[in-house]
Each structure stands twice: as C-alpha cells, then as structure tokens.
C-alpha cells in the first residue's frame, strides 16, 4: 500500500491513502508558499490542528463546498458548525477514533488555539495517524518541544512531520531533539520560510539531523510529494 503526502507550503498537507483524500490545516488563501488555490482541492476529510488562521485557513469554504468531514477538537468543531460546516467529528487530547482511512489519535501540542474571530478554540493538538496498513504518521502541529514526545515515539512512527521555523514553534535545535525523542523512520520539516520571521535552511537542518540521528529527512518544495 502506497501513501502520498504532499506539502502545499507552511503547515498545509495533503494525504492520499487507500483511495481517501485528506487535507491537514488547509491554508491556501494568503499563504505565500501555496501553488494551489482552495477552489482546486476536494478532500473527503480535513484535519485541523488548532484555531489559528494559518491552520484553520480555508477550512470553512472547502468543507462547505466539498462536504468534507472536519476532524478537530470539540471547540473548533462547534465554531465550524456556526460557520455552516455540516459534518464535523470532534475529538480531544488522548482520544482516538477509527475512520475509513485509518485511526486518528489527537495528541498534545504546546501552543495556542484562538480562532480567527477571537473565539475560544480549545487546546492545540497534533495527530497520530495509523493508516490501514499499520503505518503511522505523526503530525506534530504547531508546538514547542515536550518530553512526552518520547511516549508518542514508543508507538513506532514511520513518518514524523515537524515544525522547524522557530519563533512560533520549535526551531531547528529543538526539532532535532524532537527527532531524538520520537525516533521516527523518516521526517518532513514544515512551518518554515513562509515569511521572513520563520526563515530556515531546511537542507542544512536535514543534513544535521541525518548525521546526528541517522533518520532520513525529506525536504519538500511547496507542491512536492513523498510517496511511502
Ligand atoms: Ni499556530
Ligand atoms: Mn502556525
């Protein structure tokens, strides 16, 4: 079973797995790195890690048009319902649920989660996906480093998607420590170089991580994909 993970720039990801199309944090409008417009994507599922505008992004418009089910925390799902999104599945930290494409567990993240209109967005989160063939993808979301990444790593992660931009999330140093705690087979860095404030040289980081940990790092260009 082959899965395709696409990075649309910033923290926006697409995942094709077993015939299902997922979007994570679909931020296209106003995303200087995005090469695709929100009108061009039609997922069946949208995962939202937290309430910030660069993550909720175009969720309302895409979900209303495509009918996609949005998976997010309870507070964000309630807010989306008030914006006219009909199908949501609320989860919360530590809880998992089986969907047609796999099992999704909501993990903690050290960050904020207020929604674009200032509404309370609950706690920020990451997601641990167990796909139908058993392979696991950890999407850290926006987060600082935390020691319990070790517990997440105990599950055996095939692919970890980590922020490295610094300022709002882990920077390169802490992201390297995160790789040590998580011990994934492969890593993709995200949430960098969208704006000058979070500019990073991902290629340099990738070489450092590979030398220090032996973990394979894939530096994608916006629009680029990894098949695994
Ligand atoms: Ni954020
Ligand atoms: Mn962010």
Image (cartoon, grey):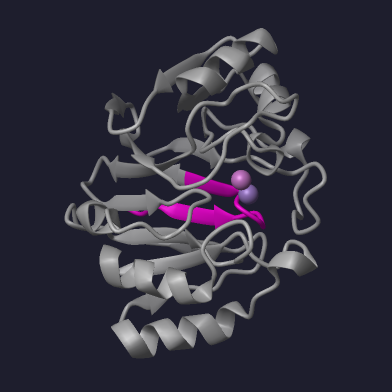
Q: Is residue 184 visible?
A: no
Q: In which quarter of the view is residue 37 placed?
A: top right
Residue drawn at (57%, 26%), measured in percent from left and top?
Answer: 121
Q: Position of residue 192 (x, y in %)?
A: 64, 65
Q: Identify which residue, 179 or 30, lies in the foreground.
A: 179
**Residue 173 drawn above or below residue 212:** above
Left/right of residue 15 with respect to residue 100 in the rendered view: right
For the view shown, which residue lies furthest in the bottom direction? 211
Left/right of residue 98 with respect to residue 145 in the rendered view: left
Over which residues does the magenta segment extend?
A: 1-15
Q: Position of residue 105 (x, y in %)?
A: 31, 36
> How many tags in the picture?
0
The quarter in which the C terminus is drawn is bottom left
Q: Position of residue 142 (x, y in %)?
A: 53, 50
- As for residue 124 lying within the magenta part, the answer is no
- As for residue 2 lying within the magenta part, the answer is yes
**Residue 153 drawn above or below residue 106:** below
**Residue 134 drawn above or below residue 221:** above
Residue drawn at (64%, 22%), measured in percent from left and top?
Answer: 63
Q: Position of residue 143 (x, y in %)?
A: 49, 52
Left/right of residue 14 with respect to residue 58 in the rendered view: left
Residue drawn at (55%, 22%), measured in percent from left and top?
Answer: 76
Q: Is residue 62 visible?
A: yes
Residue drawn at (74%, 37%), measured in percent from left and top?
Answer: 38
For the view shown, which residue lies furthest in the left direction? 154
Q: Identify which residue, 66 or 91, lies in the foreground.
A: 91
């Amino acid at each position: 079973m082959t899965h395709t993970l696409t990075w649309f720039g910033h923290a926006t990801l697409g995942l094709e797995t077993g015939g299902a199309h997922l979007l994570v944090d679909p931020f296209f409008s106003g995303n200087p790195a995005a090469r695709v417009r929100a009108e061009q994507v039609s997922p069946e599922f949208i995962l939202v890690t937290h309430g910030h505008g660069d993550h909720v992004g175009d969720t309302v418009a895409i979900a209303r048009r495509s009918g996609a089910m949005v998976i997010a925390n309870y507070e964000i799902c309630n807010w989306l319902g008030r914006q006219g999104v009909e199908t949501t599945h609320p989860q919360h930290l530590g809880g998992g649920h089986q969907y047609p494409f796999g099992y999704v567990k909501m993990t903690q993240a050290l960050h904020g989660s207020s929604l674009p209109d200032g509404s309370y967005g609950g706690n920020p989160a990451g997601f641990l996906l167990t796909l139908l063939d058993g392979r696991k993808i950890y999407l850290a979301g926006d987060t600082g480093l935390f020691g319990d990444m070790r517990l997440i790593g105990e599950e055996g992660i095939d692919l970890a998607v980590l922020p490295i931009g610094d300022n709002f999330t882990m920077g390169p140093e802490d992201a390297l420590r995160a790789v040590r705690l998580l011990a994934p087979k492969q890593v993709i860095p995200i949430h960098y170089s969208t704006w000058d404030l979070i500019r990073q040289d991902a290629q340099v980081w990738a070489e450092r991580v590979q030398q220090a940990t032996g973990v394979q790092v894939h530096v994608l260009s916006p629009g680029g994909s990894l098949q695994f």
